[in-house]
Image (cartoon, helix red, strand yellow):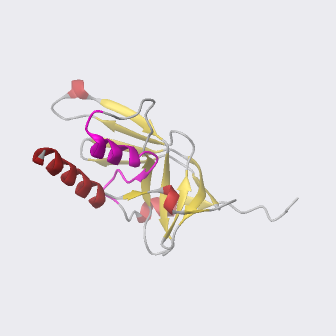
Amino acid sequence: MRTSLGVALVLMSSVAAAKHVYPKNLKVVDAGQTYTLLEDYLFQEKAATLTLFAGRYVQKYEDAKAVYLMGDAGCFQMSVSPPRKPHARWSDRWDCGVYVPKDGNKGAAIFVVRRTPETSHEGNGAIIDGIIRAGYGSFDFPTSEKDDLLLRSKLVPQQRDMDPS
């Protein structure tokens, strides 16, 4: 019992320390600003190659500090190639978006939308399974770079159509 409680506390504290944003806690933005990323944005982080694909990113949410741009389905890819284990290579795509602070001097950050699996997550105990399920659909920040001025500079705002018809 103590071990289970200890594991649950460690998991809860690690979840609390991680950067997650829950869309249900954000203000929904109707007809938000559209930005275009004209070319794929690639960067390396340890053994991973991360790609934010070129395309349209539309503001769907905001909070007091930032706007949240949502990309098309599968707009982010992570490819991992462990240096001493080439047989363990893998690659996957996620729905994603870009966090853009309202302070124009701060850089942007990529987030991915945590998937909801086809079958419910069970088997780790009620508390841990509840913590895992609570994270479905949250925005997770998979990179160490949370203040990326280069990424922000590559997002080109599109002119809004002023004609209401």
* Residue at the spot 47% in from the left edge and 60% down from the top edge: 99
Q: Is residue 53 left or right of residue 48?
A: right
Image quadrant for the N terminus?
Answer: top left
Q: Residue furthest top?
A: 87
Residue 20, image x, y percentages: 38, 56
In the rendered structure, does residue 133 fall within the stretch colored magenta? yes
Q: In the figure, 80 relative to 42: above or below?
A: above
* 140 or 24: nearer the viewer: 24
Residue in the image at 17% along x and 49% along y = 5
Residues in magenta? Answer: 123-145
70 vs 85, left or right, is: right
Magenta residue check for 68:
no
Q: Is residue 135 visible?
A: no
Residue 13 on image: x %, y %: 23, 58
Q: Residue at x 50, y 56 (%)?
A: 23
Q: Is residue 95 visible?
A: yes
Question: Which image quadrant for residue 58?
Answer: bottom right
Residue 59 screen position, x and y as percent:
60, 59
Which quadrant: the C terminus?
bottom right
Please, is residue 152 above or below residue 73 in the view?
below
- Which of these two is toward me, 26 or 93? 26
